[in-house]
Structures are given as structure tokens and as C-alpha cells.
């Protein structure tokens, strides 16, 4: 499960817990208030306490019958009335007591207000003086009719359940607390999730309108969840698209620039053929050479474009690198012989690699032909192999003029030619194609200048 899931879970859990705690606090506070209210409804003045003491002594020594007679006598006098309630919630004189009072008598903290007293037989009664029990009055007829259900010497029967005025109160307060808390946290969660999504939508709109510089990463702040990962992926996508678009523009610019010269020479050659028919053979040779240059340039551009776009499906097979190098060296000796250049091959390490032979052949040939092309006449090109961990190292060294250090980082860009190339013909696509081929084969290429002069190119290929 991702980080965004846990954030959803945490916010909803927090909302629910807030609601539960709010409801619990409400009922606790209500119960506390009820207890305090009950204590305020019971008299604790000295007169009431003296009456309660007298009733407690009467009950303890004379029993229920004696207390009943005492309470009947007091009920006819304008004095505070003592109530006696048994564990079942029945008042001795059948006077009405609310259900709330019956349930809370044993929980009242002020022990002066409610006195526990026992009969000689051990039965417990709660004795107290309610605030409204001041004036005597006749017993309700309903209570008189219930006296036959009491044991001998007792009056009345059990009162039915009573409800307070208007019935029980519906707990609207916890409902509103839960509603407000859920609304608050749900709104916060919705804002937390919708804000980056809105930013992503705006960024997509800007990209769709052609602005490939749009970025969403800075707007994500310090987020560390899937939405932040999506924003970073979006930035990488737009950056890659921008790079590809810029590359296509540069490619179009370079191709048009490179094609302009051979086309101009073709037009000159055609003009000379018309004006000087006696030079037709040499003019046709020139036209043929320029057309071959254009064909080669277009072929290299198409191959580079296919490699960069990933259209080419690599079909790897197991190849012995030594055999592949022998073929490359044999084909390069013809060009080297024309410049009296010797190729010293030292294939001391050979290994099996997984590659597409024709592509890898082209990549190595480009490096070796460059070494021959930029080396002076009557010099040598060295080719060596060695094992380096789980890789095979191929090193090609020449004795040319090298490349300025400031230009080494740009040498793999299409159509880039170093200032040291001089009058050597070329389009600057060979090393760019080599780099793309090696990337497809999980290989590496490193170029550095030799101390004694010339260039050292190292190619690293993983073993099969």
C-alpha cells in the first residue's frame, strides 16, 4: 500500500476518532451535570440532616413499620419530607421518584445528602430530603389503590416508570460535533489531494498548448507521496519531450546545412556539363561522388533517428567478440593501407557477449575508422582487449591531434565536429551512432586524450 493510502486512512481515522471522543465527552459531561443537578435537588441543611438522622435511627432499631409510621406523621406537618428508597427503587410512602433519581442515588458523591441505613433484617434504604418535599398533601388515589400489593405493614406498590417533562432529550450536540469534525477533515483531505491534481491539469494544458518548459515539481513542495512521484515523472516526461523536440530541430538544421554544400556542387557540376561537353566524364564523376555523399549522409541520419526513437528492435545473440574484431580490422586495413598506417591488434582477452552483430560491428568500425582518418600518414593505430570484472574492455588508440578538453563532453552530439578535425571530411554522426548502439547493448564508451598525443577510446561491454 502506498503513502497516499495511509494519508487517506489517517485523515478518516482522525475524523472518526474526533467524532467518537466528542460524543464520549458529551455523554460524560451530561452525566456529570446530571449528578451535580441531582445533588442540587437534595437538601443538606441542618434541619434536613436532623430529620434524616432520626429516620435512620428509627429504621435501624424499629424496622420498616416504625419508619413508615414516622414518615406518615411527618407527611402531615409542614416540615422537610424524608424519602426512603429501597434497592428496587420503591419509595416507602409510594411518592413519585424519577427514573433518573432512582438510578443515580447510589452514585451521588455528597454522602451527607443521601444516607444509607439498614433494617434489623439487613435491608438497605437510601434516605434523603428532596428540595420539593416541604408541604404535606394527600396521597394520590392511584398510590392508595396499589397498597394491596405491598407486604403487611407496607403501603402502596411499585410505581411505574416515569419520564421527565417532554421525554428524553435527543442528543443533537454529538451529531453536530461529528458533522462539523467530519466536514472539516474531509474538506482538508479533499484540498490536500485536489490541489496537486489541479496543478497537474494546468501543467498538462500548458504542455498541450506547446509549452514544454512547464514543470509541476516545485509546486509539490515537500510532499512525499504518489502525487509527488507523479509530478516528478511529469517533469521528466516534459524534459525528455523538450530534449527530443530540440534534437529534432537541431537535426533538421544540421541536415539542411550539410545537404546545402553537396547540392550546390551538384548544380555546379550540371552547369559545367552543359557548358563544357568535352569535360563531361570528369563532371559526371564529380556528380556521382556528391550524390554518394548525400546518400551516405541520409543513410546515417536515418539510422541515428531510428536508434534515438527506439524503433529498432534489438535482436541479440551470443557473439565471440574476437571474431567480430577480426572482421572489423580486415575491412579497415584497406583504408589504413592508403595512408600507410599500421593496425596493431592485441586481442589478449576474448569473451562471449550478447549483441546484434551488425549494429555492434558498425559501432566499433566508426571508432576504428575515425582513428585511421585522424592519424597522420606512416603512423599506427593500436587495438587492445582486456577483461575488467564482468565487462570486456576494448581500447583503440591513435596518434592524431586529439580533441580539446573543453569539447570532449560534446563529441557524441549529432553533427558535432571538433575544431581539431581540420580538413578531414565527415558529418559528425559516427560517434553519435556508436553511443546510441552501445546504450542499446548496456555498454559504455569513454574518450580521453593521450599524454603522448592522440586519442584513447575505451568501449566496455557486459559479458554474456
Image (cartoon, rainbow, N blue to C red):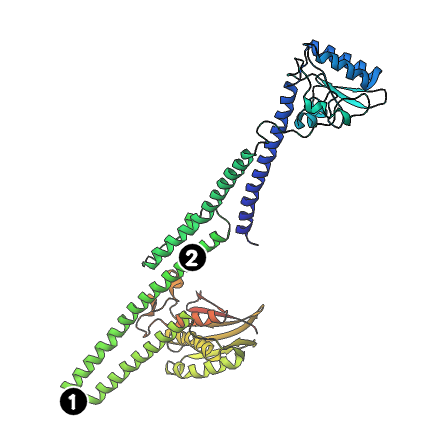
According to the picture, the residue beneath numbered tag 1 turns out to be: 277
According to the picture, the residue beneath numbered tag 2 turns out to be: 234
Up the image or down, 140 lies above or below 251; here it is above
Horizontally, residue 381 falls left or right of residue 77, namely left
Residue 119 seen by the camera: yes
Horizontally, residue 173 falls left or right of residue 369, namely right
Local SS, label 2: helix
Q: Looking at this rendering, what residue extends furthest in the right direction? A: 121
Q: Which image quadrant is residue 237 in?
A: bottom left
Query: Which residue is depicted at the point 47% across and 43% down?
Result: 187
Q: Mark number for residue 55?
A: none
Query: Which residue is depicted at the point 49% across and 72% down?
Result: 441
Residue 61 at x, y percent in the picture: 84, 15
Horizontally, residue 283 falls left or right of residue 49, namely left
Image quarter in which the C terminus is found: bottom right
Q: Looking at this rendering, what residue extends furthest in the left direction? A: 275
Q: Which image quadrant is residue 241 in?
A: bottom left
Specify which label sits upstream in the sequence, 1 or 2: 2
Give the crowd class for mark 1: few <14, some 14-19, many >=20 residues within 10 Å: few
Residue 201 at x, y percent in the picture: 39, 54
- How many numbered tags mark residues here? 2
Image quarter in which the N terminus is found: bottom right
Up the image or down, 249 lies above or below 64; here it is below
Between 328 and 250, the one nearer to me in the picture: 250
Local SS, label 1: helix
Q: CA distance from mark 1 to mark 2?
A: 63 Å
Between 447 and 139, the one nearer to me in the picture: 139
Up the image or down, 201 lies above or below 244; here it is above
Horizontally, residue 393 falls left or right of residue 61, namely left
Amino acid at each position: 500500500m502506498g503513502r497516499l493510502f495511509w494519508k487517506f486512512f489517517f485523515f478518516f481515522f482522525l475524523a472518526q476518532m474526533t467524532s467518537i471522543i466528542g460524543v464520549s465527552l458529551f455523554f460524560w459531561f451530561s452525566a456529570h451535570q446530571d449528578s451535580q443537578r441531582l445533588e442540587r435537588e437534595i437538601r443538606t441543611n441542618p434541619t434536613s440532616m436532623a430529620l434524616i438522622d432520626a429516620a435512620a435511627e428509627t429504621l435501624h432499631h424499629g424496622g420498616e413499620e416504625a419508619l413508615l409510621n414516622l414518615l406518615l406523621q411527618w407527611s402531615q406537618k409542614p416540615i422537610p419530607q424524608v424519602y426512603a428508597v429501597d434497592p428496587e427503587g420503591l419509595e416507602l410512602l409510594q411518592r413519585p421518584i424519577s427514573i433518573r433519581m432512582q438510578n443515580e442515588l447510589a452514585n451521588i458523591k455528597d454522602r451527607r445528602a443521601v444516607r444509607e441505613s439498614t433494617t434489623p433484617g439487613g435491608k438497605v434504604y437510601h434516605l434523603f430530603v428532596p428540595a420539593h418535599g416541604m408541604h404535606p398533601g394527600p396521597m394520590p388515589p392511584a398510590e392508595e389503590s396499589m397498597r394491596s400489593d405491598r407486604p403487611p405493614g407496607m403501603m402502596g406498590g411499585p410505581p411505574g416508570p416515569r419520564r421527565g417533562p417532554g421525554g428524553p432529550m435527543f442528543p443533537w450536540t454529538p451529531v453536530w460535533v461529528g458533522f462539523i469534525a467530519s466536514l472539516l477533515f474531509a474538506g482538508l483531505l479533499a484540498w490536500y489531494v485536489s490541489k496537486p491534481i489541479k496543478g497537474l491539469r494546468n501543467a498538462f494544458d500548458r504542455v498541450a498548448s506547446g509549452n514544454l518548459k512547464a514543470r509541476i515539481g516545485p509546486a509539490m513542495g515537500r510532499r512525499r507521496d504518489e502525487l509527488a512521484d507523479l509530478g516528478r515523472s511529469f517533469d521528466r516526461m516534459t524534459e525528455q519531450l523538450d530534449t527530443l523536440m530540440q534534437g529534432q530541430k537541431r537535426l533538421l538544421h544540421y541536415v539542411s546545412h550539410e545537404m546545402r554544400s553537396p547540392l550546390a556542387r551538384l548544380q555546379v557540376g550540371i552547369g559545367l556539363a552543359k557548358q563544357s561537353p568535352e569535360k563531361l566524364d570528369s563532371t559526371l564523376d564529380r556528380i556521382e561522388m556528391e550524390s554518394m555523399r548525400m546518400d551516405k549522409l541520409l543513410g546515417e541520419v536515418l539510422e541515428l533517428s531510428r536508434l534515438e526513437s527506439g524503433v529498432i528492435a534489438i535482436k541479440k545473440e551470443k557473439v565471440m567478440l574476437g571474431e567480430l574484431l577480426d572482421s572489423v580490422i580486415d575491412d579497415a586495413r584497406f583504408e589504413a593501407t592508403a595512408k600507410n598506417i599500421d593496425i596493431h591488434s592485441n586481442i589478449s582477452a576474448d569473451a562471449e557477449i550478447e549483441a546484434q552483430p551488425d549494429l555492434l560491428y558498425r559501432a566499433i568500425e566508426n571508432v576504428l575508422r575515425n582513428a585511421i582518418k585522424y592519424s597522420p600518414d606512416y603512423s599506427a593505430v593500436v587495438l587492445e582487449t582486456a577483461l575488467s570484472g564482468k565487462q570486456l574492455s576494448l581500447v583503440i588508440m591513435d596518434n592524431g591531434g586529439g580533441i580539446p578538453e573543453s569539447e570532449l563532453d560534446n563529441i557524441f552530439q549529432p553533427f558535432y565536429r571538433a575544431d581539431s578535425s581540420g580538413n578531414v571530411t565527415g558529418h559528425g554522426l559516427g560517434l553519435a551512432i556508436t553511443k546510441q548502439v552501445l546504450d542499446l547493448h548496456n555498454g559504455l564508451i569513454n574518450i580521453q586524450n593521450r599524454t603522448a598525443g592522440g586519442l584513447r577510446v575505451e568501449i566496455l561491454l557486459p559479458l554474456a
